[in-house]
Amino acid sequence: MKKILLVDGTEVSRNFTEIILSTMYETICASTGAEAIELFRDERPDVVLSKTLLSDMTGEQLLRELQAQFGEVIPFVLTGIDNASDTERQALQSGAWDFIRIPFAPEILLCRLEKVLWFADKLKAL
């Protein structure tokens, strides 16, 4: 079973997303960027799903820190409530594989993560 690291500082939102993800994936959760880095080190998830704004850093900062510490391509998806196209563009330019606007439909979240995981598997096979 594929493993998703969910990073979200809002408990209600994190629990809601975890319920959706648990239908198809093993899910591990972090509420801060620092906690996510430790869990990434210990759990080596297949993809990271992070909010753009965390209490201790941004999602983009988390991605850069993970890449710096682990020196590998990390399938990383950002979520955010900002509807501005600049936010989505910035997320993708920072190295995120996808950006999903909140609120999202559960089936859309699952489909987009399935696509990211498919690409990640293809990349590993090269």
Image: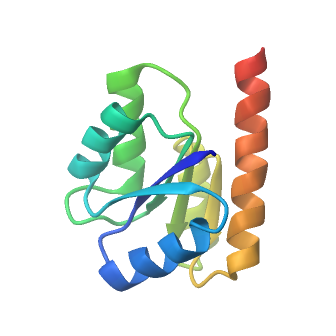
Give the residue displayed 49% in from the left and 40% down from the top: 45
Residue 101 falls left or right of residue 41: right
Which residue does the image show at 42% across and 29% down from the upper left?
A: 67
- Furthest residue to the top? 126
Q: Identify the image quadrant of residue 25.
A: bottom right
Is residue 118 at least partly visible in the picture?
yes
At 63% from the left edge and 68% from the top edge, which residue is drawn? 100
Residue 81 visible? no
Q: In which quarter of the image is the C terminus?
A: top right
> Relative to residue 27, is residue 112 drawn left or right?
right
User: Residue 56's x, y, as percent?
Assistant: 20, 58
The picture places residue 53, in percent across and down from the top left corner, at 35, 66
Q: Is residue 91 or residue 126 the one in the foreground?
A: 126
Counting from the top left corner in percent of width and height, residue 74 is at 53, 34
Q: How is the image coloured?
A: rainbow
Above or below residue 33? Residue 8 is: below
Of residue 85 and residue 118, the one placed in the foreground of this image is 118
Left or right of 113 in this view: 30: left
Residue 120 in picture, x, y percent from top left:
70, 34
Which quarter of the figure is the N terminus placed in? top right
Asked whether 9 or 68 is in front, the reply is: 9
How many numbered discs, if any?
0
- Nearer to us in this view, 27 or 99: 27
Quadrant in the rendering for residue 22: bottom right
